[in-house]
Image (cartoon, coloured by chain):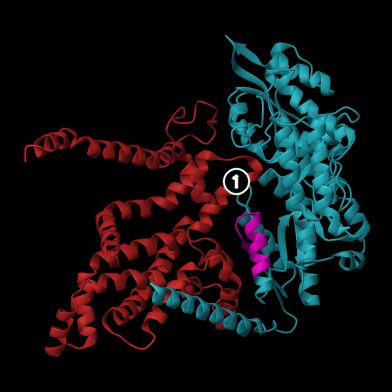
């Protein structure tokens, strides 16, 4: 027995030494051969997060760009989901290889990406544009909210969505209920649309998922006059407006009996219930619209979440275009040019039609393509309108930990384990501690 | 003597019940395991626009293959199948050669440091593949084979698990038999090829199936060392349907894609399951 243990130990030791050795050996790094003079080869890493042929669309755009710029070669690289894109960028940068020059990553990953040195600011490139300021001002402010870090611009809105309220317009008409305009009328509408037979609910007025709650919750707080996040190290979890918003969410089930009690793990199921007429209203991503319109046999309405101090509110989501670090000037310029090319109003209109993402630029919404589409599918315009009173999505330093704290205490309040005030005070306290080192 | 009789009677009375209990438990486990597979199959045959809602998650209004058609439209599964098969064969082929040679040496010969070396190989099994992403990526860059099927395969050529499994199987061959063969003038590779490998067939099959299923399902590494659909495996197709977080789960579409990816593997396992289980049993006994 003792001999065996000795062998095991020796084995482990040698293995560790070998590992370390190879690590050092390769850390020396291998230089990449530079591209031929004048020619630039770059790739763009992108995720697929909707059921649309994104690969084909991006390949088409890359071909169009190359036709206009023969010295540039662009390879779109499908890289899995959002997390996989980040891992791919991380591995190729840490591994000393050529990282894709452009990447579509979550807008909220900003701080992690900049802190790790994986992405590069675009300000110089924007300044060199003839109309750089006008270009940036053309993006919806809600989408640009997650692009700035320490006064610098790091990303351009690309495939963006928003939290919207979907309602069964036929039911509202049949029951003679007016569309809600504030919290009171919303709660009453949801209660009136809830149907019970012999104590059993046969139709809920509202399903408002809280299994990954910060995103869907934000419109409530914003509509009540206070976003849960301020600058890069500030959260307002226990601001009176936020606590009120949480209490209102809880009251929708406890007081108004208009939705299921406790934490609702219904992100994946509420869309089906809504389309089948089993739920009158749901809060969900604008990205679900195409499917909901296709699978519902009634008129689907879309609007922002009614608020108190604001008429309605929403919060953006989705991915932005980032330029990675460590590129040559020519590569960086080509990556930026292609990003601008992708965000061209006409192309964005086409992309939005094909994928269901919201056009991130005002000028894209004004194109004939988009105007025709809005005439056909007014809900798409309503989703964009919902963003009028939107503020930025929760993103700040130490995002993973802070978001985890918020989720935990939000859910314990929703489950009735703590009062709303107590839960948010605790969350604020812990989040402040988690952010201390970054101030 | 008389005291023994009641004992036997007692045993006889209860003899079948533990077996039935075992069968009952196994049936329940099998059903549990089978239910997601059956559900996916049923769900994948629902019309795309037929909403899933609480209490209505099995059959839809009708049976349809729409989801399969859409899945094939959204991802080049044909190309992916070819790539995955090539990748799996390339990995398994080399693994079998290397592992059987190494296992033969460890089972048949005594040499200085053989046990330490064997332990060293076993420790490889304890290192999670994800910890090696960056160093492996650097090696691939250095070799200049980025974006090839070879790049996907190379890191898995040396298999500790294969070496271990085959060594256990080879140890079962009596060494006297080997000695006799040697006296008769049998060379080492003839011995390996005609004596050891045939007797270790269950283990070889077991290893083959576990290697195939592992690499059939491998996702992150192939995704990182490749960038074009020309060389990517089938899991790159599946992920187009699993990460549709922004639009809520598309169960029918996701199920169809899952079926496309897993069905060949499932059928293969059903065909070879007997050998598969035998192989694991053999290696466990030794």
User: Residue A322 falls in which quadrant of the image?
Assistant: bottom right
Does residue B248 appear to the left or right of A322 in the view shown?
A: left
Quarter of the image for the C terminus of chain B: give it: bottom left
Q: Main secondary structure of the magenta part?
A: helix
Chain identity for the colour red used in the image = B
Image quadrant where one finds the N terminus of chain B: top left
Judge whether residue A107 can be spotted in this image: no
Q: Is residue A329 magenta?
A: no
Chain A colour as displayed: cyan
Which percent across, then down, holds residue A43?
67, 68
Looking at the rendering, the stretch of residues picked out in magenta corresponds to A77-91
Tally of marks: 1
Vertical arrangement, residue B281 with respect to residue B74, above or below: below
Circle 1 is placed at which residue position? Answer: A51
- Write down the chain letter for disc 1: A
Viewer can see residue A115: yes
Residue in front for this viewpoint, A118 or A153: A118
In the image, what residue occupies the spot 80% across and 71% down?
Answer: A333
Residues A18 and A244: in front is A18
- Describe residue A326's horizontal placement relative to residue A312 as left or right: left
Mark 1 neighbour density, 10 Å: few (under 14) some (14–19) many (20 or more): many
- Quick check: is A89 in the magenta stretch? yes
Which residue lies most toward the top here? Answer: A198
In the image, residue B104 sits, relative to residue A414, either above or below, namely: below
Q: Position of residue A33 (x, y in %)?
A: 67, 84
Residue drawn at (32%, 80%) of the image: B106
Point out residue B182 in the picture as x, y percentages from the top left corner.
Answer: 16, 87
Left of B58 or right of it: where is A364? right
Name which quarter of the figure residue B105 lies in.
bottom left
């Amino acid at each position: 027995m003792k001999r065996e243990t000795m062998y095991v130990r020796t084995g482990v030791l040698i293995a560790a030494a070998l590992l370390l050795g190879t690590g050092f050996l390769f850390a020396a790094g291998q230089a990449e051969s530079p591209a031929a003079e004048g020619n630039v080869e770059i790739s763009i890493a992108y995720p697929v997060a909707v059921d649309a042929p994104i690969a084909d669309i991006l390949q088409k755009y890359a071909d169009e760009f190359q036709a206009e710029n023969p010295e540039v070669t662009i390879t779109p690289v499908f890289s899995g989901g959002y997390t996989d894109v980040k891992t791919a960028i991380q591995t190729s940068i840490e591994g000393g290889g050529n990282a894709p020059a452009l990447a579509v990553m979550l807008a909220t990953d900003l701080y992690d990406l900049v802190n790790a040195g994986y992405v590069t600011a675009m300000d110089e490139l924007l300044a060199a544009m003839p109309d750089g300021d006008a270009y940036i001002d053309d993006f919806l402010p809600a989408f640009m909210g997650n692009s700035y870090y320490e006064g610098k611009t790091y990303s351009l809105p690309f495939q963006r969505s928003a939290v919207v309220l979907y309602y069964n317009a036929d039911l509202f008409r049949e029951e003679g209920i007016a569309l809600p305009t504030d919290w009171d009328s919303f709660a009453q509408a949801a209660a009136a649309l809830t149907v019970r037979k012999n104590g059993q609910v046969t139709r809920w007025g509202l399903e408002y998922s809280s299994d990954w709650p910060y995103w869907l919750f934000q419109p409530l707080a914003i509509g009540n006059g206070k976003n849960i996040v301020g600058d890069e190290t500030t959260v307002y979890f226990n601001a009176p407006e936020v606590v009120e918003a949480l209490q209102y969410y809880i009251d929708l089930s406890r007081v108004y009996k208009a939705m299921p009690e406790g934490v609702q793990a219904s992100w994946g199921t509420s869309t089906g219930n809504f389309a089948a007429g089993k739920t009158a209203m749901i809060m969900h991503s604008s990205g679900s619209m195409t499917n909901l319109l296709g699978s519902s046999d009634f008129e689907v309405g879309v609007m922002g979440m009614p608020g108190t101090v604001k008429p309605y509110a929403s919060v953006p989501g989705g991915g932005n275009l980032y330029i990675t670090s460590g590129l040559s000037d020519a590569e960086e310029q080509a990556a930026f040019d292609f990003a601008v090319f992708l965000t061209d109003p006409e192309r964005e209109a086409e992309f939005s039609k094909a994928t269901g993402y919201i056009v991130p630029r005002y000028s894209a919404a004004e194109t004939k393509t988009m105007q025709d589409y809005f005439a056909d599918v007014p809900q798409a315009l309503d989703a964009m309108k919902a963003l009028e009173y939107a503020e930025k999505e929760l993103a700040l330093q130490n995002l993973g930990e802070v978001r985890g704290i918020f989720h935990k205490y939000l859910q314990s309040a929703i489950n009735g384990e703590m009062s709303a005030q107590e839960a948010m005070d605790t969350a604020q306290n812990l989040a402040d501690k988690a952010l201390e080192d970054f101030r | 003597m008389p005291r023994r009789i009641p004992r036997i009677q007692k045993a006889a009375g209860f003899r079948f019940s533990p077996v039935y209990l075992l069968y009952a438990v196994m049936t329940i486990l099998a059903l549990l395991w089978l239910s997601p597979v059956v559900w996916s199959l049923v769900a994948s045959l629902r019309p795309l626009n037929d909403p899933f809602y609480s209490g209505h998650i099995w059959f839809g209004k009708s049976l349809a293959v729409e989801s399969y058609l859409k899945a094939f439209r959204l991802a080049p599964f044909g190309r992916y199948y070819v790539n995955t098969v090539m990748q799996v064969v390339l990995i398994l082929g080399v693994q079998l050669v290397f592992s059987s040679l190494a296992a033969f040496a460890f089972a048949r010969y005594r040499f200085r440091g053989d046990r330490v070396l064997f332990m060293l190989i076993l420790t490889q099994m304890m290192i999670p593949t994800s910890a090696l992403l960056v160093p492996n990526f650097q090696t691939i860059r250095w070799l200049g084979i980025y974006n090839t099927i070879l790049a996907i395969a190379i890191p898995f050529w040396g298999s500790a698990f294969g070496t271990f499994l085959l060594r256990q199987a080879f140890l079962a061959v009596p060494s006297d038999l080997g000695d006799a063969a040697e006296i008769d003038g049998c060379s080492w590779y003839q011995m390996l090829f005609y004596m050891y490998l045939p007797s270790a067939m269950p283990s070889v099959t077991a290893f083959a199936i576990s290697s195939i299923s592992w690499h059939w399902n491998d996702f992150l590494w192939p995704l990182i060392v490749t960038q074009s659909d020309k060389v990517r495996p089938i899991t790159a197709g599946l992920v187009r349907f699993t990460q549709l977080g922004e639009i809520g789960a598309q169960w029918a579409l996701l199920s169809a894609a899952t079926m496309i990816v897993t069905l060949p593997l499932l059928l293969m396992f059903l065909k070879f399951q007997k050998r598969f289980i035998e192989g694991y049993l053999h290696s466990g006994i030794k």
